[in-house]
């Protein structure tokens, strides 16, 4: 199984996660999250697979998130509207986003990677 690893190379957390995948010899495909963000259909499928709420997929500490005032806009947004936001700009997606056959992890926590990708 190859993990789809959506990442931003300048992101320190993404680099740590990539290093972990390399050290544990996890087979992955690195995808630049800004140059090649997932399509709306792909992202919907990823979110559904994760079982997590849509809001968890937003990079809430990002500049773009603040500029767009999404904190307030998301309160009443539908899932479809949230997908539109998330797919409009790769910088709005929380990263790294790692997608396997049946698993999805957002961000990087060593324990979570241990349990999910080892």
Image: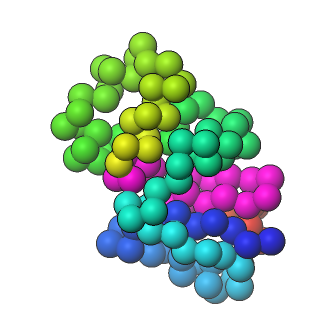
Q: Residue 41: horizontal and vertical position, in percent?
A: 61, 42
Which part of the image, by quadrant, shows the N terminus?
bottom right
Total labels: the figure holds: 0
Work out whether residue 6 can be spotted: yes
23, 89: nearer the viewer: 89
Q: State the residue at coordinates (52%, 63%).
A: 6
Residue 90 placement, left or right of 22: left
Residue 65 placement, left or right of 45: left
Q: Residue 28: horizontal and vertical position, in percent?
A: 66, 76
| Vertical arrangement, residue 36 with respect to residue 103, above or below | below
Q: State the residue at coordinates (55%, 32%).
A: 54
Q: State the residue at coordinates (53%, 53%).
A: 38
Residue 48 lies in the magenta stretch: no
Work out whether residue 12 can be spotted: no
Q: Which residues are magenta?
A: 90-112
Q: State the residue at coordinates (46%, 56%).
A: 37
40, 116: nearer the viewer: 40
Which part of the image, by quadrant, shows the C terminus?
bottom right
Q: Quadrant of residue 77?
A: top left
| Vertical arrangement, residue 12 with respect to residue 37, above or below | below
Residue 52 placement, left or right of 75: right
Q: Residue 96: horizontal and vertical position, in percent?
A: 50, 60
Furthest residue to the left? 67
Q: Quadrant of residue 14?
A: bottom left
| Vertical arrangement, residue 6 with respect to residue 88, above or below | below
């Amino acid at each position: 199984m190859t993990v789809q690893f959506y990442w931003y190379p300048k992101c320190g957390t993404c680099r740590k996660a990539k290093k972990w995948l390399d050290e544990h010899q996890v087979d992955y495909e690195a995808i630049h999250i800004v140059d090649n963000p997932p399509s709306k259909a792909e992202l919907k499928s990823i979110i559904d697979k994760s079982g997590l709420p849509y809001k968890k997929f937003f990079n809430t500490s990002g500049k773009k998130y603040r500029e767009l005032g999404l904190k307030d806009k998301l309160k009443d947004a539908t899932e479809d509207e949230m997908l539109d936001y998330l797919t409009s700009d790769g910088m709005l997606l929380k990263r790294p986003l790692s997608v396997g056959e049946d698993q999805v992890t957002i961000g990087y926590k060593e324990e979570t990677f241990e349990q999910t990708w080892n």
